Image (cartoon, rainbow, N blue to C red):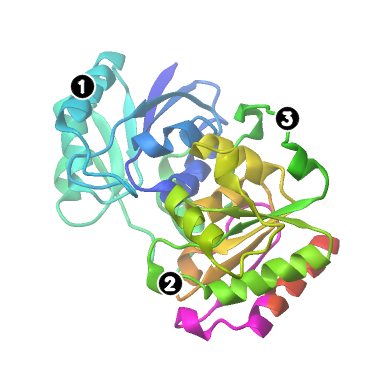
Amino acid sequence: MRKVLLVCLDNLGDLIFTSVLAEALRQDPDVELSLWCKDYTARIGHLLPGVQQVFAADPFWDKAPGRKKGSLRIFFRTLRTIRKKQFDLALIPSSCWRTAWFLQMIGIRERIGLSGGKNRVFLSRVLPAPALDEPVVAGLLRAFQPVLPHTVPPVTRLDPKGLPQFQLPSELQKLPYVCLHAFAGRRDRCAPLKVLQGLARRLEVMGFAVLWMGTGQELSELRQNPEASSRALYADRWAPDLLSVAWLISRARFFIGHDSGPLHVAGALGIPVLGFYLPGEPRRTMPQGAGPSVMIVRERAQELDDQAAEDGLNALLEKIQS
């Protein structure tokens, strides 16, 4: 049995893209696959195909969304634990030299990663980085193809069997519901709230319940908005962490939101997706899951109007029905 460590110390969307490498690795019965990821993504990390163990520690040189930089103490404690596992191989789908350096320090002899900066100094094998104008998932597969045991489709994938099994709240049992994620990582890329509220009202007229998603602070802003629908539902009532958010997404009819981690979680669970790229990087970070998807792309968030949002919704519904 070959012990392989897949490393993704980036944010949630990048972890979802990395799932395609996990899917390829799990095809080999002689691979025992583990994952090292950020703490806030760890519970989603357990859903990556074939992952048997997850190590959670934020890098001390980077911040996770809504958090401070990682703790040195926790980082080095995690490194010690990883060292004891005596991994044969580490795959590093990034060009961060620090990650490769620390894995070299703890004795992982085979460290395969992407070219860029100082990274090549600390890798045992350097692979060409994906092009900036190709989809991330296809680029990762192309880059790592020489070291992967099998070829798999360029599709992100999470294993829904790893999700907790709750009973849907009564409010979400009455009608089919749609997840609407109103926020992006940066406020200047957020769709106008007025447009999203208009889309929510249309969905309610069509017979859907609308489940608004976001952080507690973001959803508090929505609740206080005078134009908020009296029928609006808010995910923080039932989902205190990312895993329960993923469970709610997995039961939705479709997902609407910005180019962000939750959108890529939805795609990897096979949920149809309407994505806002305002502007984002649609050629690289388009929805890359197995389900149908539609993108609305604009150079500025304020360019998204009611008609464009409605057209995008209609296009997604047509794909779902076809």
Q: For the residue marked with disc 3, what is the amino acid? A: Gln
Left or right side of 16 for 233: right
Q: For the residue marked with disc 2, what is the amino acid? A: Arg
Residue 152 appears in the picture as rendered: no
Number of residue marks: 3
Q: Few, some or many C-alpha atoms within 10 Å of disc 3 (few <14, some 14-19, many ≥20)?
A: few
Question: Which segment is the magenta one?
Answer: 286-309
User: In the image, which is nearer the foreground, mark 3 or mark 2?
Assistant: 3
Between 189 and 202, the one nearer to me in the picture: 202
Residue bearing mark 3: 167
Q: Quadrant of residue 100?
A: top left
Mark 1 residue element:
helix
Q: Residue at x 35, y 26 (%)?
A: 55
| Cα distance in 3D space between marks 3 and 2 | 34 Å
Depicted 294 relative to depicted 74: above or below: below
Residue bearing mark 2: 189
Quarter of the N terminus within the rendering: top left
Residue 79 appears in the picture as rendered: yes
Residue bearing mark 1: 77
Task: Name the N-terminal-most of marks 3 and 1.
Answer: 1
Mark 3 residue element:
loop
Residue 302's label in the rendered image is: none
Q: Residue 233: x, y in percent?
A: 66, 51
Q: Residue 127: x, y in percent?
A: 32, 50
Mark 2 residue element:
helix
Q: Residue 159: x, y in percent?
A: 62, 34
Q: Residue 2: x, y in percent?
A: 41, 20
Between 226 and 5, the one nearer to me in the picture: 226
Q: Residue at x 82, y 49 (%)?
A: 175
